[in-house]
Image (cartoon, rainbow, N blue to C red):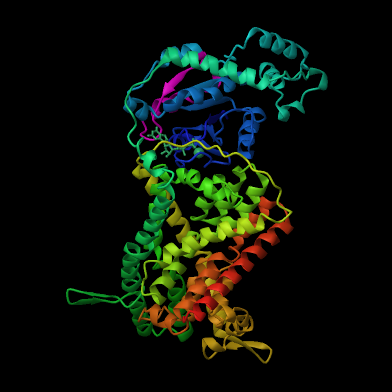
Amino acid sequence: MPTIALAGNPNCGKTTLFNALTGSNQFTGNWPGVTVEKKEGRLLGNRGTVLLDLPGVYSLSPFSPEERITREALLRQRPDAILNLVDGSNLERNLYLTTQLLELQIPVLVAVNFLDVVLARGDVLDLHALAKELGCPVVAVSALKGDRVAALAAALPGLASQPAAVPWCRFPAPAEAALNAIEASLPASIQLRRFYAIKIFEGDPLLLKEVPDKAQKPAAEGDSIIAGGRYDQIGRLCAQCVRYGRRKLPGAWLDSVLLNRWLALPLFALLMFLVYYISVSTLGAWLSEAIGEGVFGGGISAFGYYIPGIPGLLEGLLLRWHVSAWMQSILLEGLLGGVGTLLGFVPQMVLLFFCLAFLEGCGYLSRIAFVLDRLFRRFGLSGRSFLPMLLATGCGVPGILAARTIENERERRLSIITCTFLPCSAKLPLIALIAGALFGGAWWIAPSAYLCGLTAILLSAALLGRLKIFPGGEAPFVLELPPYRLPSPANLLRSVRERTASFLKKAGTVILLSALLVWFLSNVKWEDGGLHAARGLSEGLLAALGRWVAPLFAPLGFGNWQAAVATFTGWIAKENVVSTLGILYGFGGGDGAPRQHLGSAFTPLAGYSFLLFNLLCSPCVAAVSAIQREMGSRRWTLLALAWQTGFAYLAALAVYQAGRALGG
Ligand code: GDP
Ligand code: MG
């Protein structure tokens, strides 16, 4: 089965094209470094052809792990052909990789992407001349708009049987002579002779292992001779084939405001505040209230009619059908109180997903890495750590994985330990619950959760970074700024839909099972060496267990057994905190008023302390196992967990005690 590798610079639209060509739904982002693992898909309309989506690279001299993945895939796996996607609005830089791909002796097809942008700018590309010069077919597409993608798809199955590309770059005479000499001294087993000769000339450390010593003749400044030679020829090629239009891209002026030295940070704070204000505090809260109250609560009355909510309906049905009392209890208290409570928060989640996807898609969030770089450096991090944090606001696991893109070991470990301090979407229902039930929907609770997370990150980095075990050193931070783009509705919807779907899936599996377990364990008691039905929740097994640990949390203000149990179930999945509270405080009852139930157990101050502890303490098991995988050591994992939980404890303690001293 022919395999075609999709290779190109970061952020040139590979994943968008991959999705269009294979009909799959990989995550795209207006951000370099989104794809860190290779993905495989079958071509739509020709299932016999396999397409490989590779992480984006600027060259075949790999510096970071995901660049290594791409090079390994191209060199070792030897795809049958390469589809080289280049960003047409950035042709000179993108062709640098192309010149290297042409040296791999595999058929190459160059697809110039961003045709829509090229046209909007009024640039003119001479594709025929480009193809003739490079010696390989060249087409133009717009992966996003779908322009000419069908024609490209039709050309792909036959690509593998096309003649292999030939090296295009010629270097100055002395360098060519040296390259020829190296080529002649290579053992016969090496096939990519020109490619290897150049790599040896450059002194590329990763490939030197594979060639015998006598063939190794790295030249002084070999790498800059080669790079300079490539850029010279690309420059000449572009002068011949590209005519740049004068039109400026819309949004180019935005950077002068959004990246302004003084305005950038306040604007970022304002935007993040708005995101949480809209999605959690105001619009989201109204929607959730309507749904939480109307569907999962007491129902709605409109135009003189009364429509009961699910609890009321269910209760009525259960009574009519004479369903046994314990079955009623499972359905009403376990299922509705647990999972139902959680589902009431879906509107807020959807809104948050939408806002974040929008900011991401239009190219703003990646700029924040630059804005925060200066601030982060004072705390021993850099703008690079922002990508893991950004992803962690969705879910900690991809956030932790994204830390791989950080070359600096110290920063990588710090990012893994701290990125889950930012509230992930699973913690959102808890934030919304506390804000709604204990603070009358106060606008500042949700943004403050984000701010607390950010503060925790900076403090931790500053404190932890002093430990000797963290290697020192700073790495320069270079990141390409993507252009501002209006995010496409399709991409926005895809992002929101996938995140929502994965939440719903979790609600129907892990959280449902946890809720049933919590219901069961809180309704039985241990007596005379056996399990018996408990007469009330406070007599149950969970209550006993919770009471045993609760004193630990008493100094933080929430020393009740329900809070202790909820915190522990949160370790399985953070959504469980809310569903467990729902079961233990009986939110599932027909009156649907978490406010009263929670308000009698927590003072607002204690509630905030509880929120803070659960936001900052050790993340869920899935994230912990990601930490273990990325750290590759149990000791580092334990350090991370101990730090996170210890930090959470002290933070909650400080807030609660200070709050009490100030009069609650
Ligand atoms: P990758 O890093 O190469 O996988 O790039 P992605 O597929 O994640 O795309 C990067 C960004 O470019 C996303 O915001 C896409 O919506 C956008 N994009 C991709 N192709 C096009 C295109 O042809 N035109 C425009 N205007 N935007 C595009
Ligand atoms: Mg990608």
> Is residue 80 positioned above or below 436 on the image?
above
Location of residue 295 in the rendering, given as x and y in whole percent from the top left corner? 33, 71
Considering depth in this image, is 172 or 15 the residue closer to the camera?
172
Q: Is residue 162 visible?
A: no
Q: Measuring from the top left, give residue 52's x and y in whole percent.
A: 55, 34
Residue 552 occupies quadrant: bottom right
| Residue 152 magenta-highlighted | yes
Q: Is residue 65 left or right of residue 496?
A: right
Q: Is residue 8 left or right of residue 148?
A: right
Q: Quadrant of ligand 1?
A: top left
Classify 577 as above or below 532.
Answer: above
Image: magenta residue range: 134-162
Instruction: Identify the residue shown where x is 51% and y is 38%.
Output: 32
Q: In this view, does 373 lie above or below 539?
A: above
Task: Residue lying at the far front in this picture: please name it.
Answer: 262
| Image quadrant in which the N terminus is located | top right
Q: Residue sitting at 52 percent across and 86 percent down? A: 537
Q: Where is residue 654 in the image (x, y as percent from the top left)?
A: 56, 73
